[in-house]
Image (cartoon, grey):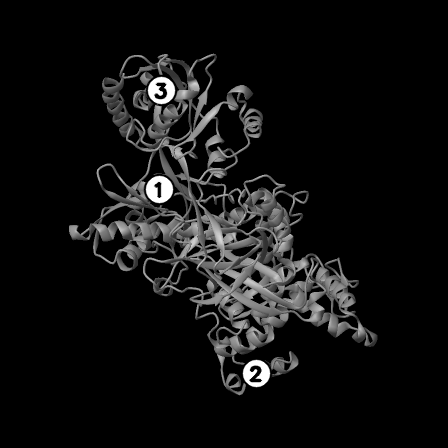
Amino acid sequence: MDKKANIRNMSVIAHVDHGKSTLTDSLVCKAGIIASARAGETRFTDTRKDEQERCITIKSTAISLFYELSENDLAFIKQSKDGSGFLINLIDSPGHVDFSSEVTAALRVTDGALVVVDCVSGVCVQTETVLRQAIAERIKPVLMMNKMDRALLELQLDPEELYQTFQRIVENVNVIISTYGEGESGPMGNIMIDPVLGTVGFGSGLHGWAFTLKQFAEMYVAKFAAKGDAQMNPSERAKKVEDMMKKLWGDRYFDPATGKFSKSATGPDGKKLPRTFCQLILDPIFKVFDAIMTFKKEEAAKLIEKLDIKLDSEDKDKEGKPLLKAVMRRWLPAGDALLQMITIHLPSPVTAQKYRCELLYEGPPDDEAAIGIKNCDPKGPLMMYISKMVPTSDKGRFYAFGRVFSGLVSTGLKVRIMGPNYTPGKKEDLYLKPIQRTILMMGRYVEPIEDVPCGNIVGLVGVDQFLVKTGTITTFEHAHNMRVMKFSVSPVVRVAVEAKNPADLPKLVEGLKRLAKSDPMVQCIIEESGEHIIAGAGELHLEICLKDLEEDHACIPIKKSDPVVSYRETVSEESNVMCLSKSPNKHNRLYMKARPFPDGLAEDIDKGEVSARQELKQRARYLAEKYEWDVTEARKIWCFGPDGTGPNILTDITKGVQYLNEIKDSVVAGFQWATKEGVLCEENMRGVRFDVHDVTLHADAIHRGGGQIIPTARRCLYACVLTAQPRLMEPIYLVEIQCPEPSAAGSPHSPPGMEDPRLGGGTCPPPHHSLPIKTLILFLISRWKSGMSGAGGFPPPCPGCVEVVQSHCRALYVLDYCYILYIFLFFVLFCLYLRYI
């Protein structure tokens, strides 16, 4: 743990059901934690009972592995190293879109990612989503093409078809990386994946075998080596292996007659030559599969002897698939291939924190904390980010799970615990407390440890009572916060819950607090009516949250309502009149207008590219250059809302107004209230800019207090919305339908949605639609099942499944039932006109 150059922090990310957990078993098995015979079936990192029952990962799980590289393998590492032993802190993350927040929490504390792709399904939409998140966090990816056994046994592709499938997947992944990455000139350099460089693996997690070009290149270098080459030093040998790897991929061909490699597909005699990848790598694998699965015992025995595969006596008696598993695991063990790829090609904390520091730390780049993070300095001030809370066996308590970026954290150390709302120089959301214990997360178990230096992932005991979900822990008095995480999904589906027995209400309230702590995404809200609302990313997410609430957190029977969808309120034009509102005492007047955001600004605020924490001049320049704002106005943004971070802006464009700064806090409070509970249906506003044009104030401060200004500002803001063509916005799901081809053509049964041609890229690109979430929840399942004769199902995985992969917002009036919405809007506007104007 002290050798920070020999630490690898990495996540396993992929589309749902592409085999992350089964593949992780091979790595855990290599570390000696589980038996090799059970690897691929144990799913060691699926620690919850419902994860084992549903066969999907719900919570990201961390485990630490030790792996030792040989002297020859060490020569392939281009970054600094300290000995041959490596500590790999691995986090297995979920693939289902409903649990994307767990992926985000895992990526924040890691430096590299193993991207797993099912070579039969190809690159799916959630693959793109998680890879985009990884690149945004400056996480370096390597690729593993999984389920190769299916391509051979089920699809029975020939070697050239299989090569073309691999080539297409590599191209699709590189397209995503080049689209969202910063290019070769960026701080990370070239992060494109390339089999020739050894950053692509092939294999089967379920069967426990895998390889990279490096494994076969080493075999052939040894085979073709001259007698004097046996005394090569590791660096010379590595150079020869790298040269051989270049010959094993792409348009390189092998002439068996001469034993030479060629760039031409035809030999001197005009005969077509086999591709080197097919001839030298796939052919031996195909021969082993064919001999064992067609029960050719003599041929199989000869192959096993020729490949020098040592089988146990019990394995020799096996036949068919069990024998195939045993042979392939011995010949090409997945643990060795993947752990070598991870240690050689993924960055250490020393390397990664140099280019990740500016994204991680909010403060100035030259303060003590920033320098400690950039240098991964164990002697610097402690800087640690808590990315999530992990429930302990003790009900109601949590381990604070995070990464030490600078300094050293130890049991009993007194630290500053800073929540996400902490502002330097203030005491809000700040606690000075000692750390009770430090622990190492080992899947379903934890191991106590005395202290943990920077570059490592750790769990803390005793911090959970001061943080809700995430936060920064430091010993540096002037430290700023680490940046908050940006999620790729939003909690847009809500249910109301109540205790079946009213006497259990206190238990329900306490259970909701624990639930909010346990999940990075879930929101627990109390409405004005007293209703308790749980908001999640989707139906499956809510189902898991409600189960946890009932069985683990509140431990009481509960009643729940049907799921409902969150809407957003917006405007489509600038206010057609100047809106005036008088204070209750008639001594103060506010003049305001509303206008819609330019396209893309709301999304930039959501991503954090425009925020209240930015330096004022930098933010003004960004708004002026990208969105053509007036620089003077851009410098006079009062706040964002709701909650100080939302996609609405209040701007002061007044000139020469007296006492304006004295009422600023009151106007901001009214703005936060109005954007939190909009005028149409008390939903959050989105994409609205409010301009304060003029203010008339009483000279005596007692007549312009908060009681006079806050309700006045709220009424004026509401009037601005009502005079600016208000609209409702509904969350839209981008839906990928995977089903038998005849079923996909049932267009009369298709739900109201818009087909999205942007995505695809698997072997059989599935149709994509943009669907309103409410439509999906209420109508999609029954209508599609009837149209697909029962071939469809929800949620995945299943033979034909509907999967929610991404969400964004769209104005309701573009949908089929806009007429009803307009009637509703007209009625609401008329009532509000009578009330407010």
| Residue ID at (29%, 29%) | 821
Q: CA distance from mark 3 to mark 1?
A: 26 Å
Q: Position of residue 298 (x, y in %)?
A: 58, 84
- Tell whether label 1 touches label 3 (CB within 8 Å): no
Q: Label 3 crowding class (10 Å Cα cut-off): few <14, some 14-19, many 20+? A: many
What secondary structure is marked by label 1? loop
Q: Label 1 crowding class (10 Å Cα cut-off): few <14, some 14-19, many 20+? A: many
803 and 698: which one is in front?
698
Of badges 2 and 3, the one in the foreground is 3
566 and 348: which one is in front?
348
Q: CA distance from mark 2 to mark 1?
A: 54 Å
Q: Which residue is mark 2?
A: 311
Residue type at the position of mark 3: Cys
Q: Which residue is mark 1?
A: 492
| Residue ID at (55%, 43%) | 361
Q: Which residue is mark 3?
A: 720
Quadrant where the C terminus is found in the figure: top left
Instruction: Identify whether 5 is placed above or below 128.
Output: below
* Res 526 → quadrant: top left
Q: Residue furthest right?
A: 228
What secondary structure is marked by label 2? loop
Q: Position of residue 78 (x, y in %)?
A: 71, 58
| Residue ID at (52%, 83%) | 315
* Res 234 → quadrant: bottom right
Instruction: Identify whether 13 is placed above or below 154.
Output: above
Q: CA distance from mark 2 to mark 3?
A: 78 Å
Q: Position of residue 15 (x, y in %)?
A: 47, 54
Apparent side of residue 358 relative to residue 808 in the rendered image (left or right): right
382 and 629: which one is in front?
382
Residue type at the position of mark 2: Leu
Residue type at the position of mark 1: Val
